Image: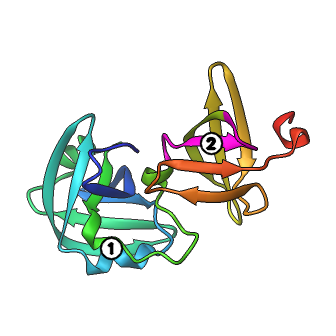
């Protein structure tokens, strides 16, 4: 999910829907309905970014279905499978206190009781509570993203302070 920090990732193209070029998108946002407010998106593949105008949008089950300008058939749409869907960061929704964009957390060092534990390498969204993956060398820790364990997350300072009990780290 890393990009040049100009964009925020709000979805990933899972595949196609039908034969007319409609794309099935997994929303990576708390509000899939926000796609209705967008005029365009940026598709990201490796380091390449391509802008597309949205011509139609609808929700289908837990996914978003999109028609993009210039994508008119199934073959064209299939070439876009796997790409991430980004929007300019200034179009991102406002966050409440103690809410963060995943992109802003990735790579931040985690200090457990003052000692460097590792860096955030992934955020798993597992329903009610996110789980932070912290990697240090060959060791990987998965810790529920609770205020109890992560006492201060300071994105601007580039640091996360934590107090994670050894019992959690040993799991």
Q: Is residue 22 left or right of residue 143?
A: left
Q: Nearer the viewer, residue 61 or 125?
A: 125
Q: Is residue 144 left or right of residue 136?
A: right
Which segment did they paint magenta? 106-116
> Which mark is drawn over residue 148?
none
Q: Secondary structure at mark 2?
A: strand
Q: Which residue is mark 1?
A: 35
For label 1, count other residues whose C-alpha is less than 10 Å away and answer few (under 14), some (14-19) or many (20+).
Answer: many
**Quarter of the image where one finds residue 134:** top right
Circle nearer the N terminus (2, 1): 1
Question: Above or below — where is 77 with respect to 89?
Answer: above
Q: Which residue is mark 2?
A: 110
Name the residue located 36 percent from the left edge and 77 percent from the top edge.
34
What quarter of the picture does the C terminus occupy? top right
Name the residue located 51 percent from the left edge and 67 percent from the top edge.
62
Outermost residue toward the top in this view: 138
Residue 87 image offset from top left, x and y in percent: 26, 62
């Amino acid at each position: 999910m890393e990009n040049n920090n100009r964009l925020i990732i709000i979805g990933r193209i899972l595949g196609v829907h039908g034969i007319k070029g409609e794309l099935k998108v997994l929303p990576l946002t708390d509000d899939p309905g926000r796609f209705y407010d967008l005029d365009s998106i940026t598709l990201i593949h490796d380091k390449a970014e391509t802008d597309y105008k949205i011509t139609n949008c609808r929700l289908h089950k837990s996914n978003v279905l999109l028609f993009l300008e210039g994508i008119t058939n199934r073959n064209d749409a299939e070439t876009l499978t796997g790409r991430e869907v980004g929007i300019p960061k200034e179009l991102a929704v406002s966050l409440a206190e103690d809410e963060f964009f995943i992109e802003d957390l990735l790579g931040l060092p985690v200090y457990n009781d003052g000692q460097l534990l590792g860096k955030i390498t992934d955020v798993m969204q597992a329903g009610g509570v996110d789980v932070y993956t912290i990697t240090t060398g060959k060791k990987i820790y998965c810790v529920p993203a609770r205020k109890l364990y992560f006492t201060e997350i300071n994105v601007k300072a580039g640091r996360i302070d934590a107090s994670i009990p050894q019992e959690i780290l040993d799991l």
